[in-house]
Amino acid sequence: MRRQLLVTAVLSSFLLAGCASWFESSSAAKPTPLAAIKPIQALNVKWTLSQAASDSGFTPVYANGNVVSADPSGHLRTVDALSGRVSADVALKRELSSGVAVAGDTVVLGTQSGTLLAVDRSSGKTLWEQSLTSVMLEAPQIAAGMVVVRSNDGRLTGFSLADGKQQWSIAHALPQLLVRNTGSMQAVGNEAVMVGLPGGKLDIISPANGNTLWEGVVANPRGATELERITDITSRPVYDGGQVCSVAYQGRVACFDAKSGSLMWAREQSSSRGVALDASKLYVTAEDGSVWAYDRSTGRSLWKTDALKFRNVSGPAMLGRFVLVIDGEGYGHLLSNESGSLVGRVKLGSEGTTAQPVSLGSSALVQGQNGRLSLLSIE
């Protein structure tokens, strides 16, 4: 399987990029052919919007009936979530390095020149700008009037949303090798920000001062070589019902008690694609494209489907009571939450994505590698 991962090495102050295929066999597993299915649930494309090509660091954001998105060329768009009509399209005249965070009419994003930029959503007017210690590759998080940013050198920094003044900063040491991370932070209301780290660690921090509320170990690095010991959390942790769950590449999937940080359960599983939760189950896409379901309370394996194996499958997202994933050929697939069987399918385009769809209840946002933004719905 061709891994959609960029392995990087930190030598002195230089960040060197490498290709995972250097370390792998040249023979890649063939994608599993799509078998015909008898659709049980319709999966519809409500609208589609063409944008510049971007990676998973440019995940769109839903905010008060609108979808706000940006692309690397510097276009900031506001789209009506129901109709797909573009209500604002602003050229910021900046090359961007990450997607957006939204608070009311304020949008915060990172630039390729290593700055944090706050702009008015409709006009693009700059509200404030701050220099960072390094370029940021994932969207910031906003909580408790603070903008929490992780730059590419591993530093977490908190800025005031009102005026951009720096309030706190914490440096994290980076291992020699790490997986390129374009999104493993997630705010939980105004109380906490969940931060997935290299080495399989999960930090829950206070947005007000950056203090660690608790730290959990999703997985421990192991192996004889630096490559084998890469155990990074590169997808967003998920909070629901007093439980925090996350997964690590070459590691485990694990759930913790959100209040105490105590480990509830962990199972061996490698994924850089992310997890999704419903009332009783956790869903995760493994690196080989198989999709798994675990009992949220005990971690017991409930089902696994290999129907999409080696098809460059995205992380899962809930779409109503179904599980949605997108494959590398641009097909959206609905899976039964009870058995994992394929119950719906739609063709989105010629190019898919490994980026996790954004769940909006009975609909979901999907952004392809070619930049195409779509809203899928089961209604």
Image (tube, helix red, strand yellow):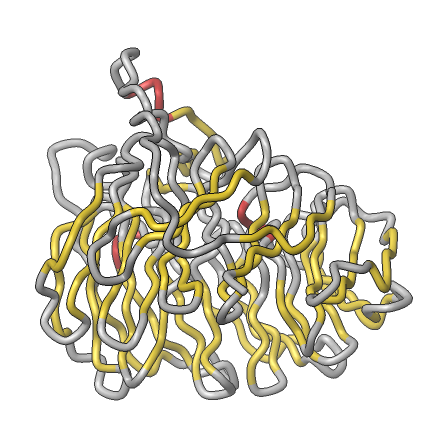
Residue 152 vs 179, above or below: the answer is below
| Quadrant in the rendering for residue 257 | bottom left
- The residue sitting at 53% across, 38% down in the picture is 347
Q: Nearer the viewer, residue 9 or 180?
A: 180
| Quarter the C terminus occupies | bottom right
| Residue 325 visible in the displayed image | yes
Q: Position of residue 249 (x, y in %)?
A: 27, 46
Residue 40 vs 237, above or below: the answer is above
Q: Nearer the viewer, residue 189 or 310?
A: 310
Q: Nearer the viewer, residue 11 or 91?
A: 91
| Residue 315 visible in the displayed image | no
**Across the whole image, how many numbered discs are drawn on residues?**
0
| Left or right placement of residue 98 versus residue 117 in this view | left
| Quadrant in the rendering for residue 83 | bottom right
| Quadrant in the rendering for residue 212 | bottom left
Q: Position of residue 69 (x, y in %)?
A: 70, 57
- The residue sitting at 78% across, 63% down in the picture is 78
| Quarter the N terminus occupies | top left
- The residue sitting at 80% across, 50% down in the picture is 75
Q: Position of residue 2 (x, y in %)?
A: 36, 25
View extreme (top): residue: 26
Residue 9 vs 212, above or below: the answer is above
Residue 288 vs 145, above or below: the answer is above
